[in-house]
Amino acid sequence: MFKKILIANRGEIALRVICACKELGIRTVAVYSEADRYSLHVRFADEAVCIGPPRSSESYLNVASIISAAEITGAEAIHPGYGFLAESSYFADVCEASNLTFIGPKPDVISLMGDKNRARARMAELGLPVLPGSEVIPSEEVALQEAERIGYPVMVKAAAGGGGRGMRIVQSAEELPHLLQTARNEAASSFGTPDVYLEKYVTSPRHIEFQILGDQHGRVVHLGERECTIQRRHQKLVEESPSTQIDRETRLRVGHQIVQALQEVGYTSAGTVELLMDENRNLCFLEMNTRIQVEHPVTEMVTGLDLVKQQILIAAGGHVPFEGETLGLRGHSIECRICAENPQTFAPSAGKVTVFHEPGGTGVRVDTAAYAESVIPPYYDSLIAKLIVHGQDRKEAISRMSRALEMFIIEGISTSVPVQRKIMADPDFQAGNFDTHFLRRFARDGENSS
Ligand code: MV4
């Protein structure tokens, strides 16, 4: 087992990794930017190294500084968390070349799944259903032909994309040339390549994802699904497990297909397969994320597993400790992502948290790096806490979340808590009746979130 791990991240996920390391008896090294000197990950790690100025590009994305910090402190492995360098095959490569274990999948698997078009083709070849779509689009002419073949509406997606950036919905041939160009521009500036492809657009889908674990001995298991449909501007606000839309039979069948495919790919570590469920409840592969995700706690609550510990054990050569089919799921879990945001513009709202009181009690978990008097810097994402509940069933989980939201006091900055209280009180949410457009009805001033 590793004696010392460096955590190449900040905020709640850096703390989450520190918790797992402490329980495994592994020493930890935090890295931090000048804006994070007083952050809890710095305080709770055994050692901490300042790696640069506040801007991510000069600190948490600075590969040379992070590798140096690992070498100076004698860390043997690096946990990347999510975001930043978590899905960089380049970073994973540099770690291996520097004799550091990257806690995640192998660089070639990260690279396969990072190319959304290649990933889709490979998964289709391995028997997973995918939506009708095109190869990378070489010209406007081909785009028009391909869109005609697929049938409108289609979606233009960035080949190197994910998470909703560089995506455009196209309703007709007239709109295509313009939207193709804007998607290309956004793809180029966000992901460094203007490559895009087309996919049949599903108008009112649900977004369901399967959690996977694979070890280095060829075993892959799935840990059931998460429902992540409640989003605003591609920012997930509520996640839950299990999904009301997936019955036992479907979970077994789809889970088995995914496991078979990822065994072929040689998938190791934790990963998530994103699926889209259409109006007829058909599930299609969308993309795979090769990292631990923000919403992993809902899976932990219903499986009783510690996914970050599993990542570390697998990276050290351990076995996934059970057969997938035998894993029982218990009860129901919901997570609310509490974001620091301006309630009018939804822009991230930075500043000082003056009062911070987190809820507790039976079945309540809070993952956060915030505390009273802590400062939310403007340089990073707006997530300040994850409120997770577990209940015997969905009804109990919802009422537990409602009371926990009531008992969460955060002053000094505005947060997403009011909208999450509204969601929990909504009869359609309570009935499991929603799609990706659910939050449009909460829009105050004609918000045109797509
Ligand atoms: C789609 C889609 C409909 N059709 N692809 C959004 C995040 C990214 N990982 C994939 N996403 C989607 N891809 C096809 N072919 C719908 C979404 C989607 C979505 C789209 C608009 C508004 C909210 C959304 C929430 C979840 C998924």
Image (tube, rainbow, N blue to C red):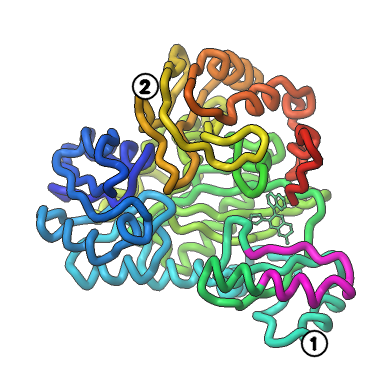
Depth check, mark 1 against mark 2: the one in front is 2
Look at the numbered disc 2 and give the secondary structure of its residue.
Answer: loop
Can residue 173 be found in the magenta stretch?
yes
The stretch of residues the image draws in magenta is: 166-183
Determine the image quadrant of residue 422: top right
The answer to whether residue 19 of the structure is visible from this angle is no
Q: How far from the left and from the top, in percent, is residue 449?
A: 73, 48
Left-right relation of 251 to 320 = right
Task: Tally the numbered discs.
Answer: 2
Q: Position of residue 260 (x, y in %)?
A: 52, 61
Name the quarter showing ligand 1. Answer: bottom right
Crowd class of label 2 (few under 14; some 14 to 19; many from 20; radius 10 Å): some
Residue 141 numbered tag: 1
Amino acid under label 1?
A: Glu
Other residues around mark 1 within 10 Å, as few (<14) / some (14–19) / many (≥20): few
**53 or 61: nearer the eye?**
53
Residue 252 seen anywhere in this rendered image of the structure: yes
Residue 117 circle label: none
Residue 366: % across, % down:
43, 26
Which residue is rendered at x = 89% and y = 69% of the image? Answer: 172
Which residue corresponds to the image point at 58% horizontal and 25% vertical from the top-left? 417
Image point 73% across, 24% down: which residue? 430
Q: CA distance from mark 1 to mark 2?
A: 57 Å
Q: Nearer the viewer, residue 45 or 245?
A: 45
- What residue does disc 2 label? 372
Give the x, y percent position of residue 7: 27, 49
Q: Which one is in front, 361 or 405? A: 405
